[in-house]
Amino acid sequence: MEGKTLARISAAVFAGIAVTAAAIEMTRKEKPVVPGTVEVSTVPADPLRDALSRCQFMGEAATRDGACLRAWAGNRQRFLAPGARPMERLPDAPALEDAVTKQSVPLFTPPAGGR
């Protein structure tokens, strides 16, 4: 068989499959979409989150805005205050010191040549 004949046959087969798929899709009956009720979130609005979003939108001007400075301080307080995170997530101080003292490589090596 020649290459042109093979290409024509494969094009005819592809066209037949496409027509069949289109006919099947057109005869399919779709279920009507019934608008349902939408649940409104019962989570209370977070004013700090709203303030942070406003400050993000302000860009560099937010660094001079007192409300943004207070919002950032509140955000830091929320995440960095003692007891804000579970204690099991924080590393133990003695274990961290032991790991540092057991290292064989010095933490700081002064540069050679005095510069």
Image (tube, rainbow, N blue to C red):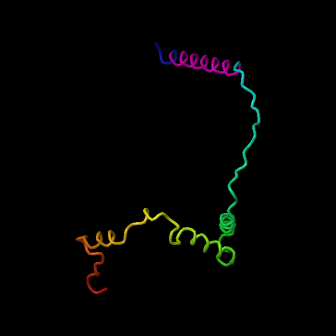
**Residue 44 or residue 113, whichever sits in front:** 44
Left or right: 3 as drawn, with respect to 64: left
- State the residue at coordinates (30%, 78%): 108
Q: Position of residue 19 (x, y in %)?
A: 65, 18
x%, y% of residue 85? Answer: 50, 65
Q: Is residue 7 above or below residue 107?
A: above
Residue 25 inside the magenta-drawn segment: yes
113 displayed left or right of 66: left
Image-based side of 62 in relation to 83, left or right: right
**The magenta segment:** 6-26
The residue at the point 75 percent across, 37 percent down is: 36
Q: Quadrant of residue 27?
A: top right
Question: Based on the displayed image, in which of its 4 quarters is residue 30 positioned?
Answer: top right
Q: Residue at x 67, y 64 (%)?
A: 53
Number of marks in the image?
A: 0
In magenta stretch: residue 4: no
Q: Name the spot of residue 47 as percent of width and height, x first.
A: 69, 65
Q: 100 or 14, which lies in front?
A: 100
